[in-house]
Image (spheres, rainbow, N blue to C red):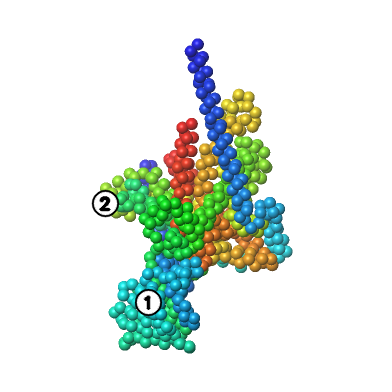
Amino acid sequence: MSTNNIETLKSNVNKLFYFKRAWAFGIPIAILAYFTYVFISFDILGLSERGSLKNAKSLVGDMYSHKVHVTRDNRKGDISISIEGEKKGRYPSGEAPEWIELGSTSKINLGNGHLIYFGEKDVVYEVPNYGRIWAEPGLGSVEAEYPNGPLPEWINQSKNRVTITTEAGRLTITRNRTEVFRYFYGWELFFFTLDSQYHGKSISELTSLAFNGELPKIMRDFWYNKMWRHSDVAWAIGETILMAFLGTFGAALVAFPLAFLAAKNITPLAPVRFFFRRIFDFTRGLDHLLWTIILARAFGPGPLTGALAMVVTDTGTFGKLFSEAIENVDKKQIDGVQSTGARNIQRYRFGVIPQITPVLLSQILYYFESNIRGATVIGAMVGGGIGLMLTQAIITQSNWEEVTYYIILIILLVTATDWLSGKLRQRLIKGSLNN
Amino acid sequence: MSEITSTQKYEAEYFELIKKRRTYSAILLGVFIVLMISGFNVVDDRNAGSFWAGITSIFDFPREVILEASEKIEKIPGLFVKFFPSLIETINIAAAATLAASIFAIFLSMLATQGMAKWPRLIPVFRRILDIMRAIPDFVIALILIFILGGGPVPAMIAITFHTTGALGKLFSEVNENASLQPLDGLSSVGASWMQKMLLGILPQVSPNYFSYALLRFEINIRISAILGFVGAGGIGYDLKNAISWGKGRYDEAGAIFILLFVTIVIVDQLSGIFRDRLTHGKKSEGLL
């Protein structure tokens, strides 16, 4: 009998081991097979054709550096100097940074011995370790002379255009204009734009000016910086937080009374419960995206639509969570309140609500936190808050430094709310334990 | 005599305390109401249409869609077939991203947990990495990647993987903290490598919880995948955007996509709910044995 037992045990164990082994090999193989399928169906090999390394380079370059354009209109002969080629970053005519000497022959110093001279019509570029390049835009084409020897690959010459790219900058000559780019580290004009009198001043100069009563003016120049729009950004961040706040707490206000109607121990009528539960399921199931689309049709684009979309979806989530919390309350406390002769409303007020408040508040806070992150996405769809500014900056496909700035701000915002709500929730839960 | 005065004193103190607490609650409530109302007004001002004008027409758009879709009801099954590949793409984006993110998150969470980390000194580093991955919204990464990689499902997949790795990594490391470290001692005594210790000592303990969290994340990721399609990546979200921007005359397509998306979300939610329930209950019965 016992040997028989051992035999069955043995075969059972063997079977178990067989299955375990099959799982251990089967799961990785299944995962691998799935990834292979995705690899083929998403056409990952074709990415190299669709993707653009140039875009990636310009994006990454823009994130930590900026360039100054020196442009000469070859028809009129004027030279204009602007940061990132933007109107807002243009130097007033006749003014130039110290590395450019304007004159009948303008000298542009790109650093490391790279010198460019703008003559009457022609351009001369002295490249160290290579030699002197001369070019002149003609009527139909660009004529250029190079030092002897084969053309290096960093010079791109065609009939209408000459492009010279060195480690110090870039020179492009076409019939219409001659343009020089020089690259610098850092974000341009972050504190003051060129038209501010505080541009280019050091921190110590600024502090001494600030103590001499110019602080309001300095702050104003910084706050209304036309390039970085600090005041608009601050407002957009506030709008994002406001959207999340209204959405979360609005949903909580709507869901709170409805949750009682969906709780088993409060509402004895099964059809009523069923009705409200299905409403919660519906608003939750019909995703943020679909609600946003529907609401955007009625209310138009803007932060209100975003907040309302959050109200609708979170009403479903809160309704479910709250009614579960209400169902889990301790009945003894309600009985105790009832034994003192409390009426129905008083029973809820003193028997149920004190028990569920910490749970509810901690859930609301948790959703507030996740809605702040969600508000950036919804803002991008409905057009409000920092999400809108971010998408606008991305659409230009050139202001990547602004994109980086907004992303950093969003990360800071999200981490700050994470931290704050974590702290608050911890206190709420601890407080409820102490009681 | 003195007893009575002391109880009176306590009573007075008690009511004093209650009064104070009520005042604080009232002030807090007042601040909250003011914030809600003024916030609502601000947002209402900044919106293109106002709340009170819009609330009456809230069902206009759904009604138009339903009317047009019911007029062309015979075309709906064909449209389901037409948009089914995009739906599969959306689901694939979510599934592949969740799977890849789970694998990354398992390693990162182990590297970020006390007692399991291969390099204990680097625990704070891995934690910060997870925090940052979690903090960057996925649509931001998707938009940037669309610029670099062009449209299609790959940017969405990478973006969701990135964010999900952060989110799951945090949840997984919380699970890890509750795992028993004793199997690790046993395994190190027989000379197991770090990889073997994790695979044989930790994974069997935590895999039901991991799986349950990953499923929950998959539900969320399907929704996100649809939203990312709406902002430019591939999948059914992209088709939905096109159908809607065509306006009237294409609402049958919008209706079909609405239905497909809604049904998919509900089915996935239900299935993953059942699975997760089984996982947690299965664990309970094991605990009883």
Residue A284 as seen in the image, left or right of residue B189: right
List x then y, in percent, for residue A56: 43, 69
User: From this viewpoint, is residue B102 visible?
Assistant: no
List x then y, in percent, for residue A383: 58, 59
Residue type pointed to by label 1: Lys
Helix, strand or loop for disc 2: loop
Q: Of all residues shown, which one is farthest toward the top?
A: B1
Q: Residue B110 carries which label?
A: none
Could you tell me which chain the residue with mark 2 belongs to?
A: B
Residue A184 as seen in the image, left or right of residue B42: left
User: From this viewpoint, is residue B120 visible?
Assistant: yes
Q: Counting other residues with Cα less than 10 Å from the Cα at mark 2, is it few (<14), some (14-19), or many (20 or more)?
A: few
Q: Which of A105/A118 is in front?
A: A105
Q: Which of B158/A137 is in front?
A: A137
Residue type pointed to by label 2: Gly
Position of residue B161 relative to residue A160, above or below, is: above
List x then y, in percent, for residue A318: 57, 45
Q: Distance between the residues labelled 2 and 1?
A: 71 Å
Q: Which of A146/A297 is in front?
A: A146
Count the labels in the image.
2
- Closest to the camera, between mark 2 and mark 1, is 1
Q: Which mark is residue B191?
A: 2
List the residue tagged with mark 1.
A107
Could you tell me which chain the residue with mark 1 belongs to?
A: A
Q: Counting other residues with Cα less than 10 Å from the Cα at mark 1, is it few (<14), some (14-19), or many (20 or more)?
A: some
Looking at the rendered image, the quarter that the C terminus of chain B falls into is: top left
Q: Which residue is drawn at 33% across and 44% down?
A: B182
List x then y, in percent, for residue A8: 40, 47
Residue A417 as seen in the image, left or right of residue A128: right
The reply to the same-chain question for discs 2 and 1 is no
